[in-house]
Image (cartoon, rainbow, N blue to C red):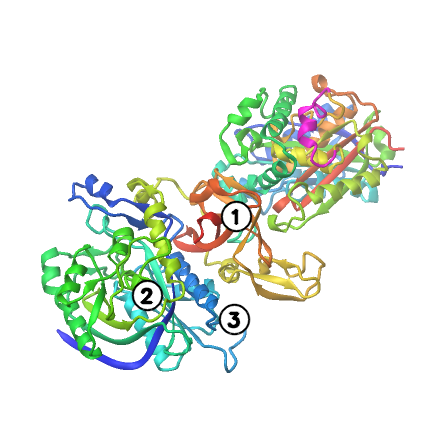
Amino acid sequence: MSAGSTAGPTPVEIVAAGVGLPAFRWSPGEAAKLWGQPAVSGSLAACGSDEDSMTLAWSAGSQALSAARNAGIRIDAPRTTSASRGDPRIGCYWGTTSPPFAEGPNLAFLASSLGLPAGTEGYLTCGSPLAGATALEAAWNALASHRVDVALVVASDARKGATGTATETSFGDGAVAFVLLRAGRSGSQGALLLGRSTRMMPVVDRYRGPGELSTHDLYDARLFREAIFLPLVREAGESLASATGEAISSWSITDPDGRLASGAAKALGGTPAGGDIRRTIGDTGAPAPLLGILPSLARSGEDPDGARTEPRSPGLLGLIAYGGGQATAIAMRCGGEIAGVSTALGQLASFGSGSTIRTHVEIMKARGVLAAEVEPVPMGLPPGGGAFVRQVGEVLELTGARCVDCGTIMTPPSIHPSCTGCGGTSLVIVPLTRDGTVVTFVVNHTMPAPFEAPLPLVVIDLDRSGRLMVQGAGEKAGQFTVGGRVHLVLRRYALERSVPVYGWKAVPESDQP
Amino acid sequence: MSWGKAAVVAAGIIPFGELFDQGYESLAAGAFRSMLSGADRSIALSEIDACVVATQRGSLWGQEGIGGNTVPSAIGLSGIPCTRVENACPSGSDAFRVGAMMVASGVHDRVLVIGVEKMRDKSTQEGLLSRAAAGHPVYTRGETAPVLFAPFATRHMHEFGTTREMLAQVAVKNHHNGCLDPYAHFRSEVTVAQVLESPPVCSPLHLLDCCPQTDGAAAVLLTRPEIAADFTDRPVFVAGFGVATDHPYLHEKATYVGLPATQLAASRAYSMASLGPDAIDCAEVHDCFTITEILDIEDLGFVEKGKGGQATLDGLTALDGKLPVNTSGGLLAKGHPIGATGVAQLVECFWQLREEAGERQVAIRKGNALQHNVGGRGSGVSVVTILTRDPA
């Protein structure tokens, strides 16, 4: 067992947060019963067929960035030109065990859809559920070394547990994002990151070999618990406490089976944090230990709707992420309420109480476990073709072309070399807004695979910008009305010749946080 | 004074439908032979100077590249000049316009116009997808053909209180007319209840609000008016035509209760023909979906904007109404073999003006008939043609 610990790097603080929750919620008890497994309680969050770790990451990341902007924190640099002196330099750090491209432009797609400048520094961390904490460390390093002034950390996962096993009934999909600055820069008191420590051990527990499509789970519960998880987590936690020199009273810990985290927190002399979130959305993998700190980042310790969350502890807060034979622990001191946290907790609470419970069959269909045996018809344009390569960027960035002469905004820019209003050719690229009003809409019921019915298509007047026609969220097909308010979210339109194709979908406003 | 610089002297069509046994060239040859056999006097092959072929989507049967110029050989005219015209759903009517301009220019005296489309060699799913694949590779995903018109139904209902029953009445009327047309794909009556209860295709449009995918072909012979008498004592003249385009994407529309391309094409055609909508005896308009006919009769000036649904319920456009529309059964019942459609509509106008339409013949009082197509991405192109018995 090798060991290492660090303490006292330049302090950075979390100043804003956001979460990403998928469209579906289900009861794993139904699956446990089907497979003759011991009963399980609680609910799990699951992606619809047009969601994945990218769309969840976008959802959490855009919320955290909005919360920071709304709190008056300066995070934006010009998108299209290189930043000048004085503009904040931004970094984007994404941790996930389920990147949509096994090899491909994951981070570039995310940064583009979040509207981050092309010069954004970034890292994608993968490989195990440790990835979320690793992304947080990467952000910390980048801020501490003054490479960037603003860091966006996103952790997301959409993992398909192995059908008929404990992972099917414990894995949940979700995302969390934080905006971080160097301490003192925001003017308000965020959550100060104070120290970290890590422990690793070359063991094989959960792995996927080269070229393999599914993950093997060598999870012998007793061996894993006693010989791997608890020792590593405890050593990382104890090392962290000794490095910070302060008592850590509350712990958010990776919780593979819903019980280990609580045991580990008690062994470290603290109380477990984030259990309610785990019970509502499941073991989310990379984001899990980061999601677990959210209740501690709320000033009151309660969400606006008064739903139950863990009481706020007086001491330091610790998070410990475990994955791939490594445990990483990070300590922080919570200050004032962090922007976006109460909204995020409200979303989690309403997801747990309000969203429809889907059936096991619906979840299997959304995950592709249960697939119609139909021949999908390939689209005319392959995703590797020139048209896609040229035009995918303007979709992700959600840009329009504004006529300098008459002000008309046309979307998307690539198909408009001239102004549709006056014929002018002086056009500038502008970002579009993501809220708007429905002008008209349809619900398409008749399409060949890979399209899925019902598919709403909605013409929207975006607030203060252009008009656009985009798909609507299929699960909300019955909720569109002429004149109704909608919001655009990133969704996966298709897996086209196994390449994910992303675009924006309209969601009726009543469903927005 | 109408334009009158070209005359239709013969017209022919094959029964539309699922024509499994006939390939693209056979369809074209069938329409051509039908035109010859229906002509008032025998026409020698050597009398035909040039050919214009309308085919919209050769890829539906696998020959996008060479569709059109294979037709002369198939009909025994190998060697003559032949040009294919593709202009979306108005391909057939635009080929007719090009043919009319060819004879008017004096370059050719007698021009054959053939519209032909083989749509059912590929599965419906692939046909739908080829539509869905048009346009921007991401933004237009999921836009099958009904998506191009259904948003207008939603908005027309919202603004004017148009109902699904009003839309259904279009299908009821056109299927009734189709029963009287031996060339129609569907020759059976439908009821309002059947339309309303048919499966949803693209809400608010249901299955019987939509035209079928159909194989078909139609042909006409155009000549200079001065030599029309060589072929018939009762030629029909081209009074005027209009073509117009519009922004191709749905989100660029100035309105969702009308089609600007139709309005503009109509105003050009009326102006060229020196007449207005009140001078039209009957019309063949583009009813690819029930809502489209409602939009058409408003955009063509037959009724006030917003009143198309009620006018249809009131029987204005029925066979015995004041202005019969789609006496052939329209696209909804006769079918919509895209390149053939516009030519077939002109064949129907030719027969109506010559009072040869049999059971579906309407009263011809003013001597003028109107043909209309609209289509392409987002109804981005429209053609309106006006035929007349009296060019003066």
Front residue (pair B210, A379): B210
Q: Is residue B326 left or right of residue A150?
A: right
Front residue (pair B374, A210): B374
Q: Looking at the rendering, in which quadrant would you find the C terminus of chain B?
A: top right
How packed mark 3 is, by other alpha carbons closer than 10 Å (few <14, some 14-19, many 20 or more), is: some
Q: Is residue B127 left or right of residue B386?
A: left
- Which picture quadrant has residue A483? top right
Provide the residue designation for mark 2.
A297
User: What is the x, y in percent for residue B30?
Assistant: 64, 29
The answer to whether one can see residue A355 in this image is: yes
Provide the residue designation for mark 1.
B133
Provide the residue designation for mark 3.
A79
Q: Which residues are magenta?
A: B304-320
Does dot 3 land on a helix, a strand or a loop?
loop
Judging from the image, mark 3 belongs to the subunit labelled A
Q: Earlier in the sequence, mark 2 or mark 3?
A: 3
Q: Residue furthest top?
A: B359
User: What is the x, y in percent for residue B214?
Assistant: 57, 32
Q: Residue at x 85, y 36 (%)?
A: B4
Amino acid at pointer 3: Arg
Q: Is residue B124 left or right of residue B34?
A: left
Q: Residue at x 59, y 59 (%)?
A: A465
